[in-house]
Image (cartoon, rainbow, N blue to C red):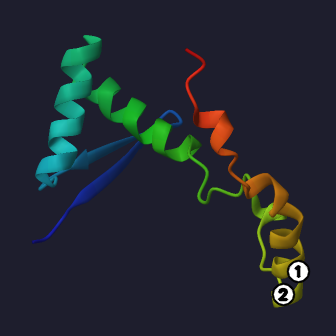
Amino acid sequence: MMHYASLLCYSGFVTISLRNLPKEVEKAILDTSHREGISLNKATLRLLEAQLRKPAKNSDFEEFCGTWSSAEADAFDAALVEMRQVDPADWESAG
């Protein structure tokens, strides 16, 4: 399937004409237009601008990512042994 786009420059603005949009793209534009009560053009621009604002990659926790050696994992598990003990009295009913 061939997709076409034509570009025309008018006083600093670009006009783009799109044909053969995938159905999910067309649906997103129509849904946005109806939901927000705006033109198809404004809906298309809004969707494109929203996509541009998304970070390319989620890197919120990169500084915390990594792997532990076996010794580090064993030391961590050993530190948690006491916390993993279940006291049956904690589960008995007071009543």
Q: Is residue 38 visible?
A: no
The residue lying furthest to the top in this view is 37
Say which of 1 and 71 sits in front.
71
Residue 48, compared with residue 73, is above or below; it is above
Residue at x 50%, y 33% (from the top left corner): 11
- Which disc, if any, is residue 22? none
Circle number at residue 72: 1
Q: How would you rate the neighbour count of disc 2 (Cα within 10 Å): few for under 14, some for 14-19, many for 20 or more?
A: few
Question: For the point 16% across and 42% down, which residue is it?
Answer: 26
Q: Quadrant of the C terminus?
A: top right
Of residue 62 and residue 47, the one placed in the foreground of this image is 62
| Circle 2: element type | loop
- Residue type, mark 1 in image: Glu
Residue depicted at x 23% and y 37%: 28
Labels 2 and 1 touching (C-beta < 8 A):
yes
Callout 1 crowding tier (Cα within 10 Å): few <14, some 14–19, many ≥20: few
Residue appearing at x 11%, y 50% in the figure? 23
- Which mark, by number, is residue 69? 2
Residue 95 shows up from this direction = yes
Q: Is 60 placed left or right of 25 in the picture?
A: right
Residue 16 percent coordinates (x, y): 32, 45
Above or below, comparing residue 67 to residue 34 in the picture: below
In this view, the residue in front, 91 or 68, is 91
- Name the image quarter holding residue 64: bottom right
Give the quadrant of the N terminus: bottom left
Relative to 21, 66 lies left or right: right
84 or 31, which is in the foreground? 84
